[in-house]
Structures are given as structure tokens and as C-alpha cells.
Amino acid sequence: METTAGTTPSRPRRTLATEAVHAGREDLAALGVHAVPLDLSTTYPSSDSRAEARRIDAFAATGGRLEGPPVYARLDNPTTARFEDALARLEGTETAVAFASGMAALTACLLARSAAGLRHVVAVRPLYGSSDHLLTAGLLGTEVTWTDPAGIADAIRPDTGLVIVETPANPTLAEVDLRAVAHSCGTVPLLADNTFATPVLQRPAESGARIVLHSATKYLGGHGDVLAGVVACDEEFAGALRQVRFATGGVLHPLSGYLLLRGLSTLPVRMRAASATAAELARRLAADPRVGAVHYPQIGGAMVAFEVLGDPHAVIGGVRLITPAVSLGSVDTLIQHPASISHRVVPEAERSRSGVSEKLLRLSVGLEDVDDLWSDLSLALASPDSTRASTPGFRTPAEGGRSFA
Ligand SMILES: *Cc1c(COP(=O)(O)O)cnc(C)c1O
């Protein structure tokens, strides 16, 4: 998994920051270019249709990447493949498969297991609102058992195809112990949604997750202009995913693949800078009498969730610098009210049971100056509805958790 074309086994393992800049680009100098070639082809000419037939048969058998040109753009794309290779290197998996969105990626994972007759899913709340909805609605013919991490082993049945967790979870930032959960899964593949942490803070495959899913729309793209998903995994599961992607068509546009590879090169720098600001904002929020509780992950990160004592809608309406919008992971700071927006599709009782209260706000911290952000947040918190509180709850990253590396 460390070796790719052009890498010799004797070459020392590179750090994440170096991989982020160079992975997926090793052949550029030999090609005589510096920027990644963007291939927008939907079809690929070949005069040898016997050879094409053999390549298509090989794909149908294993879902392995085609040798040579992709035949048709729903099978593969060389620009997107560079992003897939780079993300796999960062996550420490054999390979990765990109999709048109995070939801398309999750859909492909569910369909790949259903196609193998394994329609039952065990999942831990909270999950991203649409992921919760996709499972709860059973749109894909799957059946879900919701449990907490301690209940996973008991919830697993002979037809269980996946165990799904998010850590830190959207939007409460609740964390699960991936190593313990992976142990509870036994032979059932564990899917960890690593959107919030990114491989900069956490590499779930090292803790036993077989499938690592990202909404690449968030930190991997990093600039709010790409909708994408990606699954980092072993070659065997990737084969099933590529076959589902080919059959269902949830492919990524090559320009998005290009932008995502560019986004990866600054991912470690962006994550570290935004995380430092987020940790400081979490500290200031925890000391603020207008705030009832602050949730900040032990592993760190650029997301902060907090419960206000006053009207959360007044805070959303009151920000001027911070962008009042759903989504996360961009260079600018975003704030949203999960109960109204990102988790609106989750039934109210389940929302509050999993900690998504009406008072909760979710902040995605960007790259602005911390004092400018605090001024804006503090003014927005000074709504007429604000009341005073005395006991803010707050866990610092130092209390039992490792901070970002
Ligand atoms: C946004 C998000 C998704 C869905 O991704 P899209 O790219 O919007 O389809 C899945 N999981 C998490 C944790 C997310 O934040």
C-alpha cells in the first residue's frame, strides 16, 4: 500500500504533509508538465475491439481498474484516479474510489453489500442528517438497527453487511473509540465516516475500519466549490464499489477530481490552522455566560458545537463576518442550526435523544483571524433573548485526548 508506480520499496516512508503535496503527481516531471493534466473525455478511441472486450470482461470479473484508457468515462478517469491514489495514500489504504457526492459514496457502499445479500446495517447515532435519513427510510432496501457503540456486537446478525459510525459525529462532535468498535464488528466491515477529522487528525484504517468514507465536499476540497465523495478501502471492496459506480452512474466530474487533488495539497496546513483557531474559540465560548455547553473533540479539529442559552436563530441572524450556511470545511467560517437544517430530516425524538438539541449551533471554523471571528460571534450572541448561565460544560482537547499532530 506504500508502493505506487515510481516508488521503490527502499524509499523512506514520507510524512503526511509531504504526501499531501506529492501523491498522485509522481509522473508529472516525466510527462514534462507541472500542473495535473485534466482529461475531460467521455469516450476513448480504440481500433482493437477484441482487446476492449477483454478489458471489459476483466472489469466485470473484479472491478479492478482498467489497464490503459478507460473505454468510457463512467468506468474511470485519469484525473480523478490521481485524486483517488493520493487520498488512499493519506488514509493508508490500498486504494480509493471517488463519487459525485458523499451521499453517492454511502449509497455505493450500501448497494455493494446488499448485492452480496447483506441488507442489514448496524449504525450509531448521530450520523450526518442525510445518512441517517437514507438508512431510516430504507430507500435502498436496507434495514437499520440503531445502537450505541456498546451495543454493536449484540446488534449484528448473519445478514449484517456494514457497521456505520461517524467520529467525531455530525453535528454533536461525539467521538467513538474506533479500535473498540472495530473489535465489536468481528468480520463485519466497519465503515467510519472520517469527514470531520480527515486523515490529518485520524486514520481509521489503522484502527481497524475497513471502509473510510468522506464527504470530499468538506475539508478535502476545502473551498466550498466541489461536491464529491470518496471511499478509501482495500482493493477487493473497491472493486465492488467501482462496479456499483459504473452501473449506477454516480461518477465524479474530472474537474472536481482536479480540484480535489489540488485541495489535498493544502489539507494539512488548512486543518492545523483552522483547528488551532477552533480550539481557541471553544475556550472563549466555554468561558462565556451566554453559552450553556461547548463540544469540542478530544482529537481536536476545526468544528465546534455549542448550546446557547438564548435564541439560536438570533445568533444565525446576527453574524456578519461568519457565513450563515450549512456545510463545513471551507476556508471561511460557517455557522448553522442543525435542528433546522442539516438534521431537519431526522425525526425530532431521535434528534434530541442523540444530543441534537434545539439550542445547538454548529460552527465550521475557517482560516480567518481568531479575534475577528470572536468579535463577530460575540456580537451575534448579544441578542436580546440572551440569558445568563453559570456552569458552562467544556472538555479541553488536553483532557484525555491527543491534540492534532
Ligand atoms: C456532508 C456530509 C455527508 C454527505 O456528503 P455530500 O457530499 O453532501 O453528499 C456525509 N457525511 C458527513 C459527516 C457529512 O458532513
Image (spheres, rainbow, N blue to C red):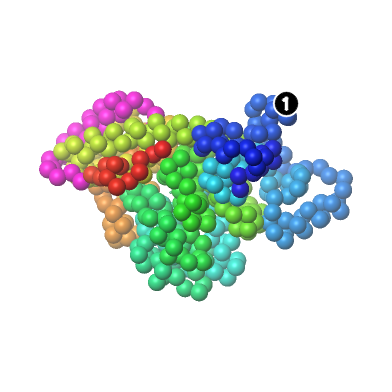
Residue 268 seen in the current view: yes
Counting from the top left corner in percent of width and height, residue 184 is at 42, 65
In-image side of 58 versus 84 (left or right) = right
> Which range of residues does the magenta coloring cover?
365-393
In-image side of 333 versus 194 (left or right) = left
Residue at the spot 64% in from the left edge and 27% down from the top edge: 35
Residue at the spot 19% in from the left edge and 33% down from the top edge: 382
**Does 270 lie within the magenta span?**
no
Counting from the top left corner in percent of width and height, residue 249 is at 63, 52
Give the position of the C terminus as an image quadrant: top left
Q: Which residue is mark 1?
A: 32
- Ligand 1 within 8 angstroms of badge 1 C-beta: no
Residue at the spot 75% in from the left edge and 48% down from the top edge: 67
Q: Where on the picture, by quarter, is residue 302?
A: top left
Q: Amino acid at mark 1?
A: Gly
Counting from the top left corner in percent of width and height, residue 34 is at 66, 26
Counting from the top left corner in percent of width and height, residue 90 is at 53, 42
In-image side of 330 versus 397 (left or right) = right
| Mark 1: secondary structure | loop
Q: Where on the picture, by quarter, is residue 271?
A: top left
In-image side of 16 versus 31 (left or right) = left
Residue 337 seen in the current view: no
| Mark 1 neighbour class, 10 Å CA radius: few under 14, some 14 to 19, many 20 or more | few
**283 lies above or below 208:** above
Question: In the rendered picture of this protein, how many numbered marks are placed on residues?
Answer: 1
Residue at the spot 45% in from the left edge and 70% down from the top edge: 156
**Does 375 lie within the magenta span?**
yes
Q: Where on the picture, by quarter, is residue 269?
A: top left
